[in-house]
Image (cartoon, helix red, strand yellow):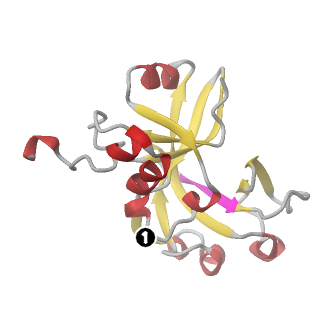
């Protein structure tokens, strides 16, 4: 199964702080493993601190997001590319209207073709078979992504809002308390 472009939502049983209540967009998934970015962990660091030319083009709140625990000294640029035409220079589509931009590209060469930009420090990664085991063990829900998920201006509400739109039992999960032991 290839889950590229899907969202992983941490189940309430996943209590490990790095991934507790996270929403992860899978950028790549296959037999060799998976790679994604956490969409709902904004940092208190403006993009201008590390990539000044990209700051004017970042989607609000205009800060770096912690994409995951791996390679925190690297940056990934996630972009929205409207339509289904050719990719702008420096952009590689992942799925639908979502793509990755080479952050060494001159923003002026690409921004007119984008509908959103978010910059992530680090990423989440899984070795071959690891993600499938975690899903089987009940650590993750796998759901369809919508382009707006990657660029929400309310990342702190993303976990609950994605669950609610699923309906049924998953919508109910959105009401679980932050710490069930305090209930």
For label 1, the crowd category at 10 Å Cα-Cα, with few meaning under 14, some 14 to 19 and many 20 or more, is few
Q: Residue at x 76, y 62 (%)?
A: 81
Residue 103 in view in this figure: no
Q: Nearer the viewer, residue 97 or 61?
A: 97
Q: What kind of secondary structure does the magenta stretch mostly adopt? A: strand
Quarter of the picture holding the N terminus: top right
Q: Residue at x 57, y 20 (%)?
A: 128
82 inside magenta stretch: no
- Say above or below: 49 vs 180: below
- Say above or below: 168 vs 55: above
Q: Residue at x 35, y 37 (%)?
A: 11
Residue 119 x, y percent position in the rendering: 57, 62
Question: The residue tagged with tag 1: helix, strand or loop?
Answer: strand
Q: Is residue 67 rendered to the left or right of residue 174?
A: right
Q: Residue furthest right?
A: 86
Segment colored magenta: 74-79
Badge count: 1
Q: Residue at x 75, y 73 (%)?
A: 107
In the figure, residue 56 lies in which quadrant?
Answer: bottom right
- Say above or below: 57 vs 16: below
Residue 114 x, y percent position in the rendering: 75, 69
Q: Residue furthest left?
A: 182
């Amino acid at each position: 199964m290839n889950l590229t472009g899907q969202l992983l939502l941490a189940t309430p049983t996943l209590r490990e702080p790095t991934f507790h209540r996270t929403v992860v967009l899978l950028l790549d998934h296959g037999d060799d493993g998976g790679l994604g970015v956490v969409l709902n962990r904004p940092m208190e660091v403006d993009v201008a601190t590390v990539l000044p030319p990209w700051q004017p083009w970042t989607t609000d709140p205009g800060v770096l997001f912690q994409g995951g625990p791996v390679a925190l000294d690297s940056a990934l640029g996630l972009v929205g590319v409207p339509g289904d035409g050719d990719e702008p220079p420096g952009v590689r589509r992942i799925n639908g209207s979502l793509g990755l931009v080479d952050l060494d590209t001159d923003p002026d060469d690409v921004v007119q073709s984008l509908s959103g930009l978010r910059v992530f420090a680090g990423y989440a990664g899984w070795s071959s078979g690891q993600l499938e085991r975690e899903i089987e063990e009940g650590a993750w829900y796998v759901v369809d992504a919508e382009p707006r998920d990657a660029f929400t201006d309310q990342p702190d509400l993303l976990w609950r809002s994605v669950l609610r739109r699923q309906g049924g039992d998953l919508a109910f999960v959105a009401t679980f308390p932050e710490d069930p032991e305090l209930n």
